Image (spheres, grey):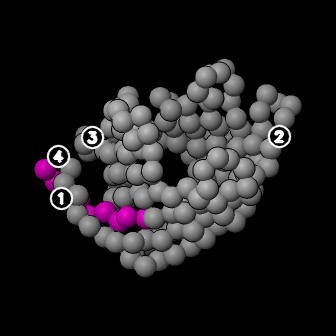
Amino acid sequence: EYDFFSKKENRRDRDIVCFIEKKEEYRGRESYVYEAPSRGMVYFVVYEDGKFIVRGAKVRLPIFSFIHLDIELDPPLCVLKGPLKTGAVWEYEGTAKVRFLAIGRIDSFIGVKFEVKEESIFSINGENVSVYRVHAVMNRSWGDENPITSDIWLGRGIGTVKAETKNSLMEIKGLGE
């Protein structure tokens, strides 16, 4: 569970719960289903050869919650390449094929550069945890904000400990049982 703060609106938003509870077939391949229900997001991920790869996503529109965008990434996006070490860099270029209402499709070019910036220690529930900060810069051919930058702090065996963009800050509330 995470605390979420909207910098844009200068207020704490609702808690975010993220989890992986199942696998399902996505575009012909069994994938883990990573869900953040309060944000209306589902990601289809696989782990292979030390890499976490996002194959696609389904995103619920905030105003029209009955409409979902189906986003296929071609090729799939490597969001994490292990083992993490300071200075490691990897890049992605591909297309997000965004389908909506089963009738429309918009293709958007995406380019992302990832860099592991540093290792540091976070205290979570009084326990010191080693984390790596991964900085990402994303450019896309469609959308308002370019480039989008983010920093994500990742802990081994924990996953995301903290994530920050220009408009938001998310921090883990504690370690699970």
Residue 25: x and y in percent read 68, 42
Answer yes or no: is residue 52 visible. no
Q: Residue at x 72, y 50 (%)?
A: 142
Residue wearing tag 1:
128
Q: Tell which of 31 and 163 is nearer to you.
A: 163
Mark 2 Cα shell of 10 Å, populated few (<14), some (14-19), many (≥20) = some
Which residue was labeled with disc 2? 105
**Distance between mark 3 and mark 2 Cα atoms:** 38 Å
Q: Where is residue 37 in the image (x, y as percent from the top left)?
A: 50, 30
- The rendered magenta stretch, by its main secondary structure, is classed as strand
174 within the magenta span: no
Q: In this view, does 35 lie above or below 132?
A: above
Amino acid type, mark 2: Arg
- The boundaries of the magenta stretch are 125-134
Decide: marks 4, 2 in contact (CB < 8 A)?
A: no
- x, y percent for residue 176: 28, 41
Alpha carbons under labels 1 and 3: distance apart: 14 Å
Under mark 1, the amino acid is Asn
Image side of residue 129 versus residue 80, left or right: left
Q: Residue beneath label 3, please?
A: 173
Residue lying at 42% horizontally and 44% vertically, measured from the top left: 168
Q: For mark 4, what is the residue?
A: 125
- Mark 4 Cα shell of 10 Å, populated few (<14), some (14-19), many (≥20): few
- Near-viewer residue (60 or 56): 60
> Circle 2 sits in a helix, a strand or a loop, which is it?
strand
Which mark lies nearer to you, 2 or 1?
2
